[in-house]
Image (cartoon, coloured by chain):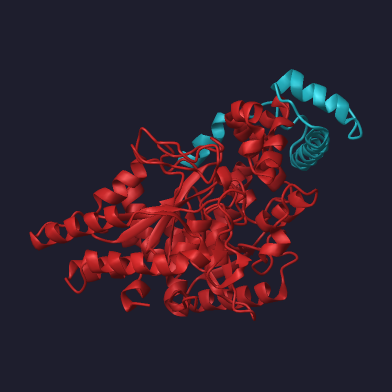
Chain colours: A cyan, B red
Amino acid sequence: MQASDPFLARQWLALTQGIEADYEMADRTLLLMQASHVALERAIEQVRMLRAGEPLFDVRIAKFDALLRR
Amino acid sequence: MSAALHLTLCEAAEAIAQGRITSEALVTQAIERVEALNPKLNAFVDLESDEALEQARKRDREQAAGRSRGPLHGVPLAHKDMYYRAGKVSGCGSSIRRDFVASTTSPLLERLEAAGAVNLGRLHMAEFAMGPTGHNAHLGRCCNPWDLDRISGGSSSGSGAAVAARLVFGALGSDTGGSIRLPAAMCGIVGLKPTQGLLATDGMMGLSESLDCPGPLARSSRDIARLMDIMSGGSHEAALASPVTGMVLGIPRTFYWEDLAPSVANRLERARRVMEDAGLRIIDVDIPDHSALADLADLVWTPEAAALHLPWLRERPHDYGPQVRARLTQGLAISATAYLRARQLRTLALEAMLSGPLARCDALFVPAIRRSVPSAAETDTGSNPNMREVLASITALTRPLSYLGLPGLVTPAGFDEQGLPVAMQLIGRPREEAALLRIAHAFEERTGFRHEAPSI
């Protein structure tokens, strides 16, 4: 999906979220999808540099709360 | 302004307990000040004068009969308009919930009032707690008491402005990405984001189940400690008596200390020297790269918020302000895999902090904001394309901590050349709020910034 295709984004929002979006909202949604993808990949790459292999495969989300209660 | 309104929360409680002032007199003075200043500040959305005076007279009768409810007996507070009170409106800064009447009461409000607090009313907030500036498309802007053309910070905007302007002695806010710490920093008061999960989120509006943190704002760390004792138990206030000599304060020289405005860097350097003089041992620490944590926080809170708001986004999208609607749209764009991977990374990021810098020191010392308090004009972006960048710059140093779930305390570190507050932020280990309060209390006792009041 390209940031220059708000028509497709409108369809995507309607099909997956039930949202009737205007073109401006759809365009912004596309840009944010791209920005969030870039941010996530950057963060994972940072972790990958510290941990060998696939860094998230054995990680449990529930451990976060356990760490805060320790 | 009455001298009594200059007191801190603890001093006011002591004055009432010793019979030097009645609750009715204190509440009356607070009401008069709200009536005089709120047209300028817009910190209160609802002043409940009659009910507050009735509560105050009841507290005075109890006191005359030798009964004290507790350590807040007769002291007026007010809270962000997202804490529910059964049978009362909780508007959440919105048009959509403007007339929402809650069926339950927040246990935090119940505990504060069981300790004797008097409720003065409901405070301004960003629409649905989304926005770090104090702008609100429905309520108008909440102004900074130090300079009405500056932003108050948000989303607990009214809590920051009302406490700083001496309208109330303390307030509850909530912090999902900095919403307690930013208004505290910009309004020159103390604000605590407790450890994630320490305080109950029942009976209050939700935004992000993973990141929401209720917490207090007041004018001193002792006040915050007392409020925490009441809300969470523990012995935060008693801990303040322990000396800070030998406690270790870590300074992460990367990320948090980069790109600071000169006036901020200068005030924080002075603050560092004050803490060294107080007997704290200051060390430089390496921290993991936090530059991506703010973006990761967005990957967690925005889809959680969008999920909560989806029915209204479908049925009445134009009842949201443009900025809030744009931010919720961001949540719709996050995939389930991105959301879950961001939450997995959260565990790793917290582990790295606990086994790294926080294993070597009692707290980290960082700025709260990199720059001086922004003007209203430069942050009034609506849904413009640069909105995300402006908001990101304000929250750059607070959002990482929300993602990590760690406690963070903001306290004034002085004033810049324009007379605007500059703040420092202390970051602690999980459930060690008392350590942050001890350090901040020692600092406040040596600097006395809390005695400075805005001349509004």
Residue B331 spot, x, y in % from top left: 69, 34
Vertically, is B433 above or below B317?
A: below
Residue B241 spot, x, y in % from top left: 33, 67
- The N terminus of chain B lies in quadrant: bottom left
Q: Can the viewer see residue B389 in this picture?
A: yes
Q: For residue B53, which quarter of the picture?
A: bottom left
Q: For the point 70% across and 57% down, which residue is it? A: B380
Q: Foreground residue, B359 or B133?
A: B133
Q: For the point 53% across and 57% down, which residue is it? A: B157
Residue B296 spot, x, y in % from top left: 69, 41
Residue B325 spot, x, y in % from top left: 68, 39
The residue furthest top is A15
Q: Foreground residue, A51 or B45?
A: B45
Q: Is residue B170 left or right of residue B305?
A: left
Q: Is residue B236 left or right of residue B361?
A: left
The residue furthest left is B65
Q: Can the viewer see residue B361 in this picture?
A: no
Q: Is residue B92 left or right of residue B149?
A: left
Q: Foreground residue, B305 or B325?
A: B325
Q: For residue B268, which quarter of the picture?
A: bottom right
Q: For residue B426, which quarter of the picture?
A: bottom right
Q: For the point 35% across and 68% down, which residue is it? A: B32
- Give the mark count: 0
Q: Foreground residue, B258 or B117?
A: B117
